[in-house]
Image: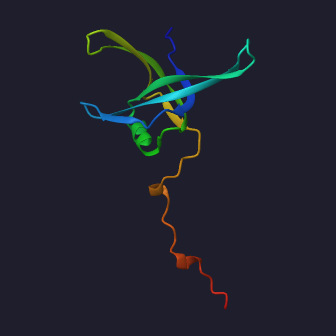
Amino acid sequence: MNGLNRVDLIGNLGGDPEFRSLPGGGAVANFSIATNEGYRDRQSGEYRQQTEWHRVTVFQDGLVAMLRKHAAKGRQAHVTGKLRTRKWKDRDGNDRYTTEIVVGPRGSINFLDARPERAHDRPPAPPPEAYEMDLAA
C-alpha cells in the first residue's frame, strides 16, 4: 500500500512570489504563506494568535504563469501540494534542511479573496463627454 503525502493550507501570501528559470527549461516560483491559529490561553484567559510560516515551491508551468499574473503579498490562498525536505550545505559547509510544500502536477493554488485592483488591470475610463447628457432633447 502506498502512503499519502498531501498538504492543504489556507493562509495569506507573505510576499510577492520569486520567479526563476530552470536550466532544463520551465520555471519555478517560490513564496511563503502564513497560517494563523487562534486560541484562548488557559492561565490568563486572553485570546492569542499563533502564526506559522510555510515555504511553497511551484514547478507546474501553468501555475507559475497564473502566479505571475495574480499573486501578490497579502492575498488569501488555498494551496494543495506535498511535503518535501531537502538537504543542502550552507556557506560554512554545514548541513541544513528545508521543509517545503511542493506544488506539482497534482497540486493546486486557488485565491479565496477578491483580486486586488491594479491600475493596469482596469479598463480605460470612458471619455468625459460620454457622461454628458443633452437635457434639452
Residue 54, position as x, y percentages in the image: 49, 23
Q: Residue furthest bottom?
A: 136
Side of 41 relative to 18 (left or right):
right
- In the displayed structure, 96 sits above or below 120; it is above
Total count of labels: 0
- In the displayed structure, 11 sits above or below 85; it is below
Quarter of the figure that contains the C terminus: bottom right
Side of 29 relative to 122 (left or right):
left
Residue 93, position as x, y percentages in the image: 26, 10
Residue 21, by quadrant, is top left
Residue 103 visible to an observer of this rendering: no
* Residue at 39% over, 32% down: 60
In the depicted view, which residue is nearer to us: 126 or 36? 36
Q: Residue furthest front?
A: 44
* Residue at 40% over, 37% down: 64
Residue 105, position as x, y percentages in the image: 43, 29
In the depicted view, which residue is nearer to us: 52 or 10? 52
Colour option used: rainbow
Residue 112, by quadrant, is top right
Side of 87 relative to 109 (left or right):
left
Q: Residue furthest right?
A: 45
- In the displayed structure, 70 sits above or below 56; it is below
Residue 67 visible to an observer of this rendering: yes
Residue 26, position as x, y percentages in the image: 31, 35
